[in-house]
Amino acid sequence: MKTQVEESFSDFHEKWTSRVEDLLQLVLAVSRDDHSHDPAVYQAVANKLTAHHKEYYTFKWAAAHEDILAFFTPVWLTPLENAFLWFTGWKPSAAFRLVESLRVSASGGGGAAAASCLSGLTEEQLKKIEALRVKIKADEDRVEREMERQQVSMADRKMVELAMLERQARRSEGGSASAADAARVDGLVEVALKGLLIGLEKVMKMADCVRLKTLKGLLDIFSPMQGVNFLASKAMLELQIKKCGQKQKKNVLVKTF
């Protein structure tokens, strides 16, 4: 049974993904238009794509504040998508691999519009992308160290003492003393759990900030046309992974029955 946050975000995610598909159709339409080389046209599309991403993170942060654990085990994603999550979302370093893959595809004669567009990156752009990649890798390392700190805190002195208190409460025989001990343990558990959840929310927001920093950094380097094609390629890749995950999940269910 889904929690209220899982229900609301599942509905939001489905509509948000549907809107992504609509925006991809807009990208295709623009690329076929006679004025497709007009930077202003691509900038307008880029603005719509970035606004759509901002909407996602705004809604996500509000929902995560109510139920952070829902985002570490998202029911709105397939098991395949969940397997590749990096602290509730896509890993920023993957964006740089995507850029490189698109360039290689173009040089190999792939012929894709997005790849062809990114094959025209200048030396100056490539240097800026590499410098951004190094900064983002350092940011990723900081997020991972923070998560490690949160994980290790599970075994700190306060948590150990809490476990010992609960064990003592379980051993106590009935009466008011036992009830008082149980109430005390429940209160301490609630405080400890709140601290853990705050820590997880911090990790999620740190990771999301790195994701947003990556997108903004790349879009600042790209031309409007390159930026739109990059965002479209990223979206198409994510949609393809979702479709593969849905197919795999369906096959598992068929085998089960």
Image (cartoon, rainbow, N blue to C red):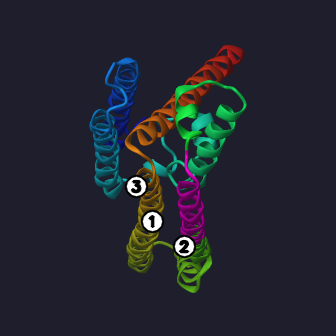
Mark 2 lies on a secondary structure that is helix
Q: Nearer the viewer, mark 1 or mark 2?
A: 1
Q: Amino acid at mark 2?
A: Glu
**Image spot of residue 129 (x, y percent):** 55, 57
- Residue extent of the magenta highlight: 121-143
Position of 29 relative to 80 (above/below): above
Measuring from the top left, give residue 246's x and y in whole percent. 57, 23
User: Does the magenta stretch mainly form a helix, a strand or a loop?
Assistant: helix
Above or below, 243 against 63 in this view is: above
As for residue 129 lying within the magenta part, the answer is: yes
C-alpha gap between disc 2 and disc 3: 28 Å
Above or below: residue 74 compared with residue 33: below
Residue for badge 3: 220
Q: Amino acid at mark 1?
A: Met
Residue 216 location, quadrant: bottom left
Q: Label 1, on which residue?
A: 206
Specify which label sits upstream in the sequence, 1 or 3. 1
Q: Which residue is mark 2?
A: 146
Task: Indicate which disc residue 129 carries.
Answer: none
